[in-house]
Image (cartoon, rainbow, N blue to C red):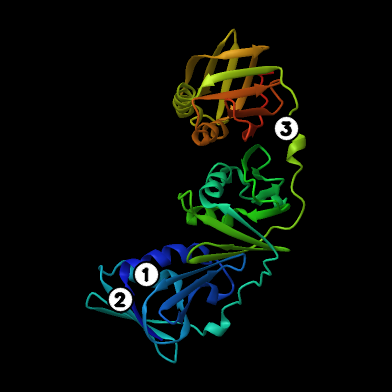
């Protein structure tokens, strides 16, 4: 194998493909990047056996071939070379040579036949979605995916498509984020649980271009995602997701509308004190058209007061500061609605007048809010 390409092109490709590089594995070949030639293109593949990413880029190929190069080391070497052309070659013993900027580095690779084959996806169930729409849905929900949970389904993100509605849901047992969008020309009906790590990687690779589309092909427990020069293969999480609609309260005793920016600033200031305590609590006290935000810790306390539009009963309720901070970080609106029943029931927060983006947050039971 021998090819020449620009350093910037190679670095861009490495930034994409190494998102699927295995960190801890009993299979050493998964710590490498499969490099293959194809006419005047190079194909790079990384896999951790749960997600595989394949990307292509243009190069001047003088000798065809394929081999596995150590992923992290190869990436670090390339990033330390100056701009300009880089020549990559590999001999019949899988020794890679990297030349550029007057530098030459040799690193030992591995036999490409040891690299696992990509999943085969029939593509019978295939849909296309706007990339910017899917990217926004991921950004607004992925933070609520459980990092670890005995229920494996909660370590993934639910994607539902039915009747032209696309819904993405993530929940970790303490809070839920739901984002819904319309895509009228998608008539397929499907449900898939995408692993949390894959969700984040997919989001990073999607474009903000409203004219760009992504193709998703489903085949049993496998998902194949096609972008312009990149493909992603994902092994889906199997099992039945939580019946999330059943945990959304049908009605509320208290409804509050508050300007988001003052609320965000109040939460941000109060969080400085809340995080100093042992319980990380923020307390909201809603009464008479006003909201007080309080936090108490061994080091001090804070009190913030806001005017709100209130309907229904007065209420005191406490939350983990992280969950409220995430809510105000990901909502983009002038005002938000906070819907409550009592101090121990789920709280629903949405952008004012927008029921298609929903945060559910479980309160913390305390003596102050009982």
Cα distance between the residues tagged 1 and 2? 9 Å
Q: Which residue is mark 1?
A: 10
Q: Which residue is mark 3?
A: 248
- Under circle 2, the secondary element is strand
Residue, far front: 185
| Residue at x 67%, y 49% (from the top left corner) | 158
Circles 2 and 3 in contact, beta carbons < 8 Å: no
Left/right placement of residue 50 relative to residue 261 reads right
Q: Give the quarter of the image for residue 105.
A: bottom left
Q: Which mark is residue 191?
A: none
Q: Position of residue 296 (x, y in %)?
A: 52, 22
Cα distance between the residues tagged 2 and 3? 56 Å
Left/right placement of residue 210 relative to residue 182 reads left
Circles 1 and 2 in contact, beta carbons < 8 Å: yes
Left/right placement of residue 169 relative to residue 73 reads right
| Residue at x 49%, y 54% (from the top left corner) | 212
Above or below, 97 against 131 in this view is: below
Q: Which mark is residue 86?
A: 2
């Amino acid at each position: 194998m021998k090819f020449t390409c620009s350093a910037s092109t190679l670095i861009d490709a490495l930034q994409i493909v190494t998102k699927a590089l295995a960190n801890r594995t009993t299979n050493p070949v998964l710590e490498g990047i499969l490099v293959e030639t194809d006419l005047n293109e190079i194909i790079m593949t990384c896999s951790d056996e749960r997600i595989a990413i394949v990307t292509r880029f243009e190069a001047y190929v003088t000798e065809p071939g394929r081999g596995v190069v150590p992923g992290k080391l190869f990436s670090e070497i390339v990033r330390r070379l100056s701009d300009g052309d880089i020549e990559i070659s590999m001999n019949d013993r899988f020794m890679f040579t990297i030349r550029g900027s007057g530098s030459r580095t040799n690193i030992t690779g591995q036999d490409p036949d040891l690299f696992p084959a990509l999943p085969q996806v029939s593509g019978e169930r295939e849909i296309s979605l706007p990339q910017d729409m899917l990217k926004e849905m991921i950004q607004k929900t992925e933070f609520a995916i459980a990092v670890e949970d005995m229920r494996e389904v909660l370590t993934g993100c639910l994607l539902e498509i039915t009747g032209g509605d696309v819904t993405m849901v993530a929940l970790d047992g303490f809070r839920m984020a739901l984002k819904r969008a319309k895509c009228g020309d998608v008539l397929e009906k499907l449900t898939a649980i995408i692993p949390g790590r894959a969700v984040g990687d997919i989001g990073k690779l999607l474009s903000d271009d409203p004219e760009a589309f992504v193709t998703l092909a489903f085949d049993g427990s496998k998902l194949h995602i096609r972008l312009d020069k990149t493909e992603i293969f994902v092994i889906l999480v199997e099992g039945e997701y939580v019946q999330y609609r059943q945990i959304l309260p049908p009605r509320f005793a208290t409804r509050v509308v508050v300007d988001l920016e003052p609320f965000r600033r109040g939460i941000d200031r109060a969080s400085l004190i809340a995080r100093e305590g042992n319980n990380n609590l923020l307390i909201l006290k809603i009464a008479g058209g006003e909201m007080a935000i309080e936090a108490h810790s061994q080091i001090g306390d804070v009190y913030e007061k806001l005017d709100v539009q209130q309907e229904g009963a007065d209420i005191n309720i406490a939350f983990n500061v992280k969950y409220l901070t995430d809510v105000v970080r990901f909502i983009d609106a002038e005002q938000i609605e906070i819907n409550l029943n009592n101090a121990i029931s789920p709280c629903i927060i949405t952008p004012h007048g927008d029921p298609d983006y929903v945060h559910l947050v479980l309160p913390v039971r305390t003596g102050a809010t009982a």
